[in-house]
Image (tube, rainbow, N blue to C red):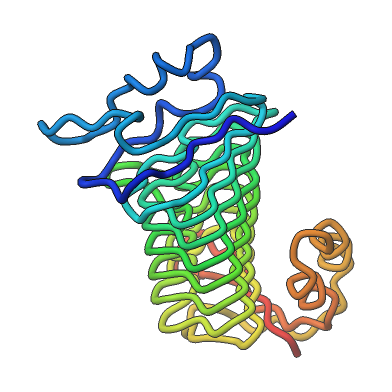
Amino acid sequence: MKPFTFTLRQEPPQRVDLSALTPDRLAGKSVAQIEAIEIGVTRISTKVGDLFKVSEGDLKTVRYEGGSARFDLLGAKLLPGFAIHVEGDVGAQCGRLAKGGRITVAGNAGPHAASGNLGAEMEIKGDVGDFLAGPLAGELAGMAGGRVIVRGKAGARAGDRLRRGILVIEGDAGEDLGARVIAGTILVLGEAKGRVGYLNKRGSIVLAHGGCFGSTYVDCGAHELTFARLFARSLRDHSAPAADLLSRKLRRYGGDTAVYGKGEILTPD
């Protein structure tokens, strides 16, 4: 059966909040009721029907034909068993607090993608903005589960305060990658710019090309790591380059010893 589809009519005149358009929230509503949902974030009214042509289908999968950098909170609090696909770009906080399911973005994503993600699988085929999987202001932890694959590059502070889960960045990463990581795993296949792993407590950061992580990381030597090879098998179908990186002999740096000190940075030997 064809997916439930939103076809973009025009570029939004303002930022729009798409958190109300997850499959569980649409269940039981008619097309007319869905078109009447208010998604604007200012005093100027913007409804679903103003921006999208709505086509009924199987609500297990919601598809957006056309995207925009003004599409905020797409897939927020998505539940397990559902999927969302966007044929285009999305804005801020894509997959915010998603509990499960799958989100695929064919274009770019804005800041705070996967913020608070609890279990969703996300694939962003373009670039992603700052604070990938990071917390919003005032929050104590970032992403707490799930897997995020970014095919392009990531902005600054990717993985900030990561609590649990897997981040794979196949392109370059911006400043302060993996800052304040609590736990979880980050892999970067491109260049990691600036400081890496600042105040890392228990996280694992794997860098294909090394990086700047300072004297508070201790060189623990090169190793053939069994867990890395097992981990590589689980990633093979999602990111073959990341699996190849994990299958190599890796040099381990323990830290950040300025804090808890049980984290690590791994680089090819």
Name the residue at 12% across, 33% down: 44
Percent x, y of residue 247: 85, 75
Name the residue at 28% across, 46% down: 12
Depth check: give the residue in front, 111 or 247.
111
- Is 26 left, or right, of 125 in this rendering? left
Percent x, y of residue 87: 54, 53
- Is 232 left, or right, of 203 in this rendering? right
Percent x, y of residue 84: 58, 39
Which image quarter holds the C terminus? Answer: bottom right
Percent x, y of residue 242: 74, 71
Figure quadrant of residue 144: top right
- Residue extending farthest to the left is 43
- Residue extending farthest to the top is 28
Figure quadrant of residue 221: bottom right
Taking 211 as reference, is 17 above or below it?
above
Name the residue at 49% across, 36% down: 6
Depth check: give the residue in front, 213 or 243.
243
Name the residue at 39% across, 14% down: 33
